[in-house]
Amino acid sequence: MATIGPEVREIRSRDATGAYRVIYLAKVADMIVVLHAFQKKSERTAARDIDLATRRLREWKEANHVQ
C-alpha cells in the first residue's frame, strides 16, 4: 500500500461475516511485521486505519533503526 509506505502490502479476506484486511511489511530479513488488522466497515479504508498503520510503520522503523 503505497499510501502507507514502500514495501507495505495488504491481505484481503471476505466471508459471511464481512471483509477483513491485514496491512503488513514483508521485506524485512526473515520476518513479517503486521502493522494493522481490522474488519472493514465501508468500501474505502478509513483514514484512521491508514493513519494507524502509518504510525506503527514509523515507530517500528525508529525502534529498529531502519530508514
Image (cartoon, helix red, strand yellow):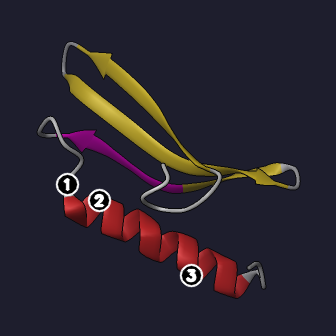
- Are the residues tagged 2 and 3 within 8 Å (C-beta)? no
- Are the residues tagged 1 and 2 within 8 Å (C-beta)? yes
Please report whichever mark, 2 or 3, sits nearer to the chain's N-terminal start. 2
- Is 37 drawn above or below residue 4 in the view shown? above
State the separation of the CA atoms marked 2 and 3.
15 Å
Q: Which residues are magenta?
A: 35-40
Q: Position of residue 12 (x, y in %)?
A: 41, 28
**Dot 1 amino acid type:** Ala
| Res 55 quadrant in image | bottom left
Please report whichever mark, 1 or 3, sits nearer to the chain's N-terminal start. 1
Q: Position of residue 50 (x, y in %)?
A: 33, 61
Q: Is residue 48 left or right of residue 62?
A: left
Quadrant location of the C terminus? bottom right
Q: Position of residue 7 (x, y in %)?
A: 65, 52
Which of 42/2 is in front?
2
**Label 3 environment density (alpha carbons within 10 Å; few <14, some 14–19, many ≥20):** few
- Find numbered disc 2 in the image and state the secondary structure of the residue it sits on: helix
Q: Position of residue 1 (x, y in %)?
A: 48, 49
State the separation of the CA atoms marked 1 and 2.
5 Å
Residue 13 included in the magenta stretch of the image: no
Who's the residue at 19% across and 54% down the image? 46
State the separation of the CA atoms marked 1 and 3.
20 Å
- Give the prevailing secondary structure in the magenta stretch: strand
**Dot 3 amino acid type:** Glu
Residue bearing the label numbered 1: 46
Residue bearing the label numbered 2: 49
Residue 36 included in the magenta stretch of the image: yes
Of labels 1 and 3, the one closer to you: 1
- Find numbered disc 1 in the image and state the secondary structure of the residue it sits on: loop
**Dot 2 amino acid type:** Asp
Who's the residue at 49% across and 72% down the image? 56
Residue bearing the label numbered 3: 59
